[in-house]
Image: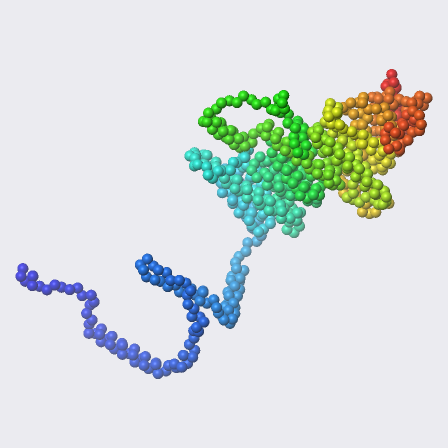
Amino acid sequence: MSAMASRPIKKRKLTPPQSDDEGTSHKSGGRKIKKAFLVNAANWNLEQDYETKARKGKKNDKESTRLPLKLPGGRVQKFSAPAGELQIEESDDDWLEGGQDESGNEEAGHEVNDNRPKIPEHQQILEAKEELAKIALLVNEDPDENVGAFKALARIGQSRILTIQKLTLATQLAVYKDVIPGYRIRPVVEDAPEEKLSKDVRKLRTFESSLISGYQAYVKDLTRYAKSGRNQAGRGGQGPSIASIAITCACNLLTAVPHFNFRSDLIKILVGKLSTRYVDDDFNKCLAALETLFKEDEEGRPAMEAVSLLSRMMKAREYQVNESVVNLFLHLRLLSEFSSKGSQDAIDRADPVGPNGKKPKGKKEFRNKRERKERKEQKALEKDMANADALVSHEERDRCQSETLKLVFASYFRILKQRVPNLMGAVLEGLAKYSHLINQNFFGDLLEALKDLIRHSDALEEEEDAEEEDMDADSRNTSREALLCTTTAFALLAGQDAHNARADLHLDLSFFTTHLYQTLFPLCLNPDLELGARSLHLPDPSKPSNAANSNSKTSNKVNLQTTTVLLIRCLTAILLPSWNVRSVPPLRIAAFTKQLATASLHVPEKSAQAILALIADVAGTHGRKMAALWNTEERKGDGTFNPLSDSVEGSNPFASTVWEGEILRRHYCPKVREGVGIVEKSLAKAER
């Protein structure tokens, strides 16, 4: 134990001891290196090396302007300027050299890009067709499981090839028409509390969210493409333009799914196309789509949105639009469904009123705070369910149709006030159609506007006669407008049930009667009396070339009736009024009968037949009042007959006889000769 205790402690050696051979070799190697260094140093050219050495000027030695940063340990760290900042200020030569290098690199890169393989355009189109067909097939099979297909379709449409863009738009149209549900998707409220949803409901909401986002992007693409151009031909002049395809897709979506979201955006596309006066195939497609929307609208809100946008567009363009746009109002369902009367400002409601003119209040049911809260939540839930199921509420439909009617009347009245030449026929025909829906307050203002229009037409006609200038292509047909105004006025009167409230309305239509009596002779000398708006008109060789071709631009009149038909309508309203036939005075009947007998000698055969048929109807009703015109021995009037009198009663018709009948007996047309015999038979029956 003592020997072990006296043994010294061993220490670990870090490095092995160097042997004698290794030490010798290391010393000999060091001597060789030192000797080689001294031999080479004698051959060095130190001055030349110093001259060629790069010199750093003080300009490049920039100090950093950044503040030092104190680290958590208390140590201060200074920031040095980056290399990019230190090399900002360079000499012009350095910048030129760098520019040359960069341009060389760009050229080299351009060559590399050009060397990449390019796919031919027809190959890309073929691949896009296959991909579109594949995606559309997947969506059609199971739309819930392929919610990402909508974005995939839109991604394909981002190609720069025009043909692929067209194919994508058409494919998306077919896909969305198939997958859009029969209800309107409600927007998800972001602030709503989280609900515990089942797996099926969560899956349905995911599909609806993807559908609504993809459909919104698609409608935006349609809007952008529709505004991109008008009737621009496709590549190489083949196929329709992408703007035309976008408008076609919008028309199909509006007629196929008018209940779905973003309906207003689709209507804006169509109204934007209708704002142009250039009529083409796309224009006619938009007209047909809106006509279909108006005819099939059972809810009332889509029609109200379309009429509102049309009214705003026409007002913004100062009613310089095609008359077929105004003619769209004639296709609204409220013409046959709406029962109240209205004007441009208000609608007459058929609400029950009490003895004091106030609506009686029903008995109020008592509810506590909890019941009122539950009732409020129930109403909100019913409203959401009605919007989702697209249910038609009678109250909501009446409200929408009331707003639509006010918009229509406001547009009509503004056009009458501005006297837009090419829209007069459409407005007057529309007012005649809507006569049963016009209230009494609006009726007086409307009649005054019609009278002003006739006076303005007469003033224009007098100016043209004084200047002896022909009417150009955009001029107004004053005689036709006057007939339309007269027809509209009497149609409005018939639609108002004015015989029951004549004392309240204080109506006087003698202005229209007198004007029609004064224009009978000029109308019977009109060569285009039996030609309609769509009839073929031969150019007049005596007119200038621009006026001779004016009839080619009048092929889209709203009122397709001929001037003869309009004249017969006016005369029937005056001589055989529907509200009170027996109230027509004998002087008016005799004056118009004598004037019409004279006019029948100068009109074509069909017009002569129509006039004689009207005289026969008048004779069957007022035979005793006009029989003296056919009897030369029993004259009831003294003085002379004045056919050019300013008033109907001042013409003194009973001082003359209908001698024109003897000439009409020898007319070349057998039907005219038969018409004269029918008139005499009607008179004979009336005298019995």
Q: Is residue 435 left or right of 590 when viewed as pictured?
A: left
Farthest-out residue, left: 2
Q: Nearer the viewer, residue 198 or 450?
A: 450
Image quarter (top left, top right, bottom left or bottom right) of the N terminus: bottom left
Farthest-out residue, bottom: 42
Residue drawn at x 64%, y 25% is: 350
Tell me residue 678's x, y (percent): 86, 23
Tell me residue 684's x, y (percent): 88, 19
Residue 678 visible (yes or no): no
Residue drawn at x 58%, y 36% is: 257
Residue 302 location, quadrant? top right
Q: Nearer the viewer, residue 511 or 315?
A: 511
Q: Is residue 451 left or right of 345 when viewed as pictured?
A: right
Residue drawn at x 90%, y 25% is: 654
Q: Nearer the viewer, residue 405 or 683?
A: 405
Q: How many callouts does the rendering have?
A: 0
Residue drawn at x 35%, y 62% is: 77
